Amino acid sequence: MASMRFPFSFPQPQPPQFPRPFTAFAVGAAIAGASAAVVAVSSSSDRPFLRNALNSVFSSGHSLPLWGSLSLADSGVSVLESKTGISFPSVLASSQKLCGIGLRKKSVLGLKNIDVYAFGVYADDDDIKTHLSDKYGKFSASELQGNKEFIDDLMDNDIPMTVRLQIVYGRLSIRSVRSAFEESVGSRLQKFGGSDNKELLQRFTSQFRDEIKLPRGSVIHLSREKGHVLNTSIDGQEVGSIKSKLLCKSILDLYCGEEAFDKQAKEEIEHNVASYL
């Protein structure tokens, strides 16, 4: 399997120029005698720049160009979604690597879209190899791009993964989050498991209790742990844990599946997961 297509190959130490601010990844990093950096990224149709950035993060032999912003406070590299200014750690729980980032938008009265939250999808690369390499290891990442069976296997297998939601919209209420999950997760539960899953859906959405506040910058983790256990936490506090393969798959399908919230993020996730094989 070819390695991840992340090498920095820009001829000059300056950020690439794009005709529109939200049409391509703008990758920036700075390492000047320090071990931390921020990589600036925008969710867009041109994804190789994120691949370049993350490869430099995960292969310590590279020296990053001196354009971008340096964070001395962090012990590792963060990836910055440039449209929203939201940053994502490149690694979660010491072993889950960032596979892609995107935006969840919502239409308001059909007139405008608001950015509700930015999200990052993480997966344990060792477990990806364990569960998927026998079947897919002979294929290149480009050959697996758009392969529905490959993504279905990713969602079905017992691979630790986390979807990290970082709230962008400052007026978001917990009731709105609960209602949105009732609709989106409910449709996936019906898609994969039939109509009789109301109790499972209620167990999940009831975790988002009315007293919880979600100001801009709040972080929600939806983590599939070993044994197909979905662990939900908000700002570092666990709010619930449910053992259900169906629920785990339904959550992941929102971000990785055929009708993902952000199609371009889905493509990036596909490519990077394939690159870990």
Image (cartoon, rainbow, N blue to C red):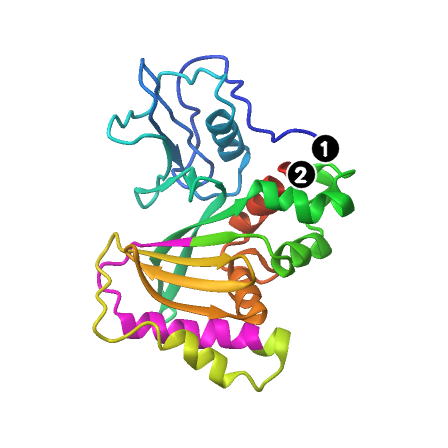
For the residue pair 45 and 170, the one nearer the viewer reads as 170
The residue wearing badge 1 is: 1
Q: CA distance from mark 2 to mark 1?
A: 6 Å
Secondary element at tag 2: loop
Residue 169 colored magenta?
yes
The stretch in magenta equals: 164-189
Residue at numbered disc 2? 277
- Circle 1 packing at 10 Å, graded few (<14), some (14-19), many (20+), is some
Q: Are marks 2 and 1 in contact (CB under 8 Å)?
A: yes
Residue visible at 59% across and 41% down? 126
Identified by mark 1, the residue type is: Met
Q: Earlier in the sequence, mark 2 or mark 1?
A: 1
Across and down, in percent, residue 193 comes to: 62, 77
Which residue sits at x=73%, y=36%? 140
Task: Specify the quadrant that holds the C terminus.
Answer: top right
Position in image of residue 85 (x %, y %): 30, 42
- Residue 108 appears at what percent x and percent y? 34, 68
Q: Residue at x 57, y 41 (%)?
A: 125
Instruction: Write down the quadrant of residue 31 in the picture.
Output: top left
Quarter the N terminus occupies: top right
Question: In the figure, 238 relative to 178: above or below?
Answer: above
In which quarter of the view is residue 276 placed? top right
Relative to the observer, which residue lies in front, 36 or 142?
A: 36
Q: Residue 163 in the image: state x and y as whole percent.
A: 45, 54
Residue 121: give its label: none
Residue visible at 31% across and 13% down in the picture:
33
33 over 159 or under it: above or below: above
Dominant secondary structure (helix, strand or loop) of the stretch shown in magenta: helix
Kindly state the secondary structure of the residue where label 1 is placed: loop
Q: Is residue 147 above or below residue 231?
A: above
